[in-house]
Amino acid sequence: MARLRRKADFPVHEVRRYLEPGPIVLVSSRWRDRTNIMTLGWHMVMEFSPSLVGCMISGGNHSFRLIRDSGECVINLPTTALTDTVVGIGNTSGAAIDKFETFGLTAEAAQEVGAPLIRECHANFECRLHDDTLVDRYNVFIFEVVKAHVAPTPKHPKTLHYTGGGVFVTAGGVVDRKALFRPGML
Amino acid sequence: MARLRRKADFPVHEVRRYLEPGPIVLVSSRWRDRTNIMTLGWHMVMEFSPSLVGCMISGGNHSFRLIRDSGECVINLPTTALTDTVVGIGNTSGAAIDKFETFGLTAEAAQEVGAPLIRECHANFECRLHDDTLVDRYNVFIFEVVKAHVAPTPKHPKTLHYTGGGVFVTAGGVVDRKALFRPGML
C-alpha cells in the first residue's frame, strides 16, 4: 500500500475538483455503535455553495439505514492502490462483517459528523443530509459537504472509474485547456 | 478528427457502461426551429430500468429552456478527439451562435426524440424528461434514456473527465477485476 500522506483542509465549494470526474468512492457511515463502508459510483456534483452532492444509495445496502437514520456520511476517495479493497467492499455486506477490520482500513474521527473518515483514502468529504426529497422514490440522497480533507499530492490522483461488469478505467493523462476558457468559466 | 465509426443499437439499461465513469458529455437539444449543444459534467446514473440519468443543467444556459420546453435531449459522448470542440462549446452561448455550424458538427435525426444526435461523438443517448421534481429547486432534470447508439470500437473510448479550472483528466488504463465479483454483482 502507498505511503499515507497527511491531508490538508480543502475548500468545500471546490470538491467538484475530485468528484466531477466520476470516480468510484467509498461511503462510510455510523449509526449508534455500527459503522459501515460501501462502494458507490452513482453520484454527481449539484452545486458549489452550498457544496451539494447527490448520491444514489440502493435500499438493499446495509449502509442505507445507517445513512438514513444518522443523516450523515463521509465520501472517501480511493485510488488504484486500493483497487482490490474497493472491489471487496462492494462485494460484501456490512450486515455480516466489520469492513474496517476485514479490509484493514483505519477509521479516523471526523470533525463535523459522526461517521468515520477512511485514513487510507486520498480525500475525505464529510457530508450531512441536505434534502431527502428523492430518497423514497429514487434512493437519492442530496448531501452537503461540510468539511473536506485532501492529500496535497499527487495533484491528480489515479482514481478508479467503474464501467460495470467488474471492469474499471483509471484516471489517465492530464489535459490542460485553461488558455481556451473565458475567465468567468474557470 | 478520427474516422467516424458506424454505431450500433445498444441496450438502454446498460448505459452506465459509458456514463458511470463520469465523462464530460455534450447535450444536444431542439425546441421548434432552434437547436443547441452544451457541455455537461454534472450527471449521474440513477436506475438501470427504466434507464434514468440525472443532469444538473444550470438555468443560465441557453439549452435550459430548449430542454425544459421540449422535455427532450440527447446525451452525446465525446472523446479526446473532440477536446477543443468540447471546450469551445462550453465557452460560447447558443444565444449568439449556431454551435453545429460553428464547430463543424453533424446533426443527425434521432429515432425517438426531436433533438439531434451529434454524429462525431462515440455514443448518443436519446432522452425524454422522466421527472421534473428537482428542476425548480436544483436545475436537476431526471431523464429516461429511450434509445442508445454506440460505436462498437474502441471498447473503452478515451473520454474526458473535467476537474474544473480548465483541466481534464482522460480515461486511462483498463483494470479488470471480474474474477473478484460475486455473480449477482456483475
Image (cartoon, coloured by chain):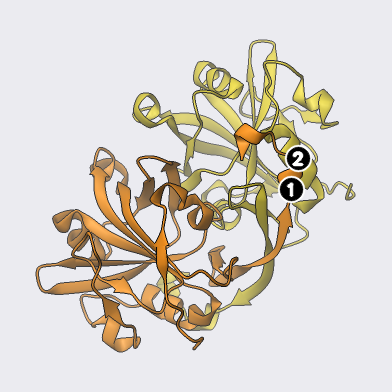
Chain colours: A yellow, B orange
Give the image quarter of residue A35.
top right
Out of B181 and B79, give the one closest to the viewer: B181
Q: Residues within 10 Å of mark 1 (few under 14, many from 20)?
A: some
Whether residues under marks 2 and 1 lie with C-beta atoms below 8 angstroms apart, the answer is yes
Which chain is mark 1 on?
A: B
Pick the quarter of the image with the C terminus of chain B.
top right
- Disc 2 from disc 1: Cα separation: 6 Å
Give the image quarter of residue B175.
bottom right
Q: Determine the residue positioned at 47% across, 70% down.
A: B151
Q: Is residue A53 above or below residue B112?
A: above
Residues tagged by mark 2 and mark 1 found on one chain of the structure: yes
- Give the farthest residue toward the left: B32
Q: Position of residue A7 (x, y in %)?
A: 77, 46
Residue B131 shown left or right of residue A127 in the figure: left
What is the number of the mark on residue B29?
Answer: none
Residue underneath mark 1: B177
Residue B123 visible: yes
Q: Position of residue B3 (x, y in %)?
A: 49, 86
Q: Position of residue B66 (x, y in %)?
A: 18, 63
- Give the farthest residue toward the top: A32
Q: Amino acid at mark 1?
A: Arg
Mark 2 residue element: helix
Residue underneath mark 2: B180
Out of B19 and B181, give the one closest to the viewer: B181
Out of B159 and A8, give the one closest to the viewer: B159
Q: Amino acid at mark 2?
A: Leu
